[in-house]
Image (tube, helix red, strand yellow):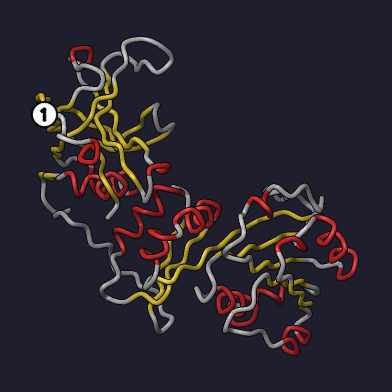
Amino acid sequence: MNTEETDGEIPVYVFFGFMDSGKTTLIKETLFQNGFADDFDRCLLIACEDGDEEYDEDELKENGIDFVEIDDQKDFTLEKMKSLQDKYDPQAIFIEYNGTWESSLLYEMDGPDDWVIVQSLCTVDATTFEMYLKNMGTMIKEQMFRADVIIFNRCDDSTPKAKFRANVKGLNRRAQIVYERKDGSIDNRPDELPFDINADELHITDADYALWFMDCMDNAKKYDGKTVDYKGLVYNPTEGKGKLRKGTFVAGRFAMTCCVQDIQFLGLPCRYDKADEIKHKSWVHVTAKIKNEFAREYRGKGPVLYPIKVEPAEKPATQEEELVYFN
């Protein structure tokens, strides 16, 4: 199914999330409370699972919204979508997707030609997120990877927003994240970080590295001019396609979101006149000034480190200790 909108095509809005995560409530709020359906004469709502929250089909009809249920994954086919297009001739389509189905079933569907996915949203129950991430990681990560907006609902003062945000950004850097409290209001409190962001010098432990890295990447301005120190693994190949430009090395850590398949290297470029002396795959302790500036690596502005000192560091005793985590 297409993901780029052009004139004359039918916008498709996809709602991801496990059962009871709030998808149905979000769709009803979008259609009725926010008046979204008023922009179209004819809409089609396709529900792929039957949760506790139900739709009022009479209310849908009164607002020009046709309602179809598809409970079996084998019935979610291109032929079925084309038949719905012919029958209802919708101007906009809303799909409440089944949280246990692979999203590729939808995104790799070759048509209908007029349907264009313009936005995907994922609802997440903040009270069960960590449990699902641990036990059903592949499913929930696939949904978050596809989403333009991720809504953590049922939040309260104890919700670890910084940890959740780091988990999301480790999978999907472009996603907008919204935290909604149990009463439906938006939680705009700043994310609480496990280090003092107001300090001029930031001492980043292994346990805090992943959270710091993601926050620094997303909010480089607030780190501009600060000094940071941390232990990192060096990326600095001397030859081959991955060779860095002169005077640059990268110091970072391998981070794991929730399982081995998700391990990725998180590192920041370091501008250093002795970069060629820093051995590839060595361990170092870096103390550096952070600058928010244009960098070729980002194709725009981002955090760049200017080391004050680079000292050899001991390699962690085990492979597990080499990794950093988002929790």
Above or below residue 14? Residue 257 is above
Q: Residue furthest right?
A: 86
Q: Residue at x 66, y 84 (%)?
A: 55
Residue occupying image coordinates x 22% and y 57%: 193
Residue that mark 1 sits on: 314
Quick check: 256 above or below 305?
below
Dot 1: what SS?
Answer: loop
Relative to 23, is 196 on the left or the right? left
Q: Give the residue drawn at x 42%, y 42%.
A: 261
- Outermost residue on the top side: it is 239
Residue 29 location (% of width, % of height): 58, 79
Q: Is residue 270 above or below residue 181?
A: above
Q: Is residue 152 above or below residue 167?
A: below
Q: Amino acid at mark 1?
A: Glu
Q: Residue at x 22, y 37 (%)?
A: 322
Number of numbered discs present? 1
Work out whether residue 307 or residue 233 is closer to the camera in this orientation and state it: 233
Dot 1 alpha-carbon crowd within 10 angstroms: few under 14, some 14 to 19, many 20 or more: few
Q: Is residue 143 left or right of residue 202?
A: right
For the C terminus, the quadrant is bottom left
Q: Residue 176 at x, y = what percent?
A: 46, 57
Q: Is residue 283 left or right of residue 25?
A: left
> Viewed as shown, does residue 319 lie left or right of 145?
left
* Residue 96 place in picture, x, y as percent: 64, 69
